[in-house]
Image (spheres, rainbow, N blue to C red):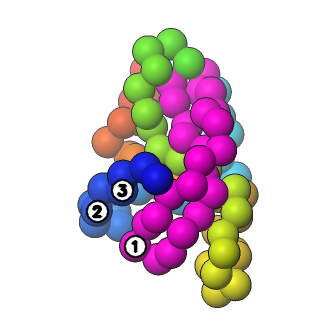
Amino acid sequence: MGESKTLPKYFYLISKKFVAMNVVVGPKIGRKLLTGSYVVEDVMCSKCGEKLGWKYVETFNLKQRYKEGMFVIEKLKLTKKY
């Protein structure tokens, strides 16, 4: 299982409407997080390979099922260039 970092909620961008550009999704892996066990896919920058966050693929807890298909992206890793 992978590791989890505990950061305050405001450090994350959580969305089903995340428009991914220049990112790749890694293989499905099992990960134990604060709210239970999940199958997730890491989301990484396609240019440098930096891990940006993860995507929930499957949960084993019915109360957490709403997270399936959602992305969790660390806000500190996002940049916007004009």
Q: Secondary structure at mark 2?
A: loop
Which span of residues is magenta-colored? 22-45
Q: Are marks 2 and 3 in contact (CB under 8 Å)?
A: yes
Q: Residue at x 28, y 62 (%)?
A: 6
Q: Which mark is residue 6?
A: 2
Residues at marks 2 and 3, CA–CA distance in whole angstroms: 7 Å
In this rendering, which labeled residue sits more in front, label 2 or label 3?
3
Q: Which mark is residue 78?
A: none
Residues at marks 1 and 3, CA–CA distance in whole angstroms: 8 Å
**x, y percentage for residue 20?**
65, 34
Residues at marks 2 and 1, CA–CA distance in whole angstroms: 8 Å
Q: Examine the residues drawn in magenta and state their main secondary structure.
A: strand
Q: Residues within 10 Å of mark 1 (few under 14, many from 20)?
A: few
- Amino acid under label 1? Leu
Residue beneath label 3, please?
4
As drawn, 15 above or below 43 = below
Q: Are marks 1 and 3 in contact (CB under 8 Å)?
A: yes
Indicate which disc, 2 or 1, sits on the residue closer to the N terminus. Answer: 2
Q: Quadrant of residue 46?
A: top right
Residue beneath label 1, please?
34
Of 26 and 76, the residue lying toward us? 26
Q: Secondary structure at mark 1?
A: loop
Q: Residues within 10 Å of mark 3 (few under 14, many from 20)?
A: few
Q: Locate residue 22 relative to residue 36 in the image: left or right.
A: right
- Amino acid under label 2? Thr
35 inside magenta stretch: yes
**x, y percentage for residue 32?**
46, 64
Q: Are marks 2 and 1 in contact (CB under 8 Å)?
A: yes
- Amino acid under label 3? Ser
Q: Locate residue 49 relative to residue 62 in the image: left or right.
A: left
Q: Residue at x 45, y 37 (%)?
A: 52
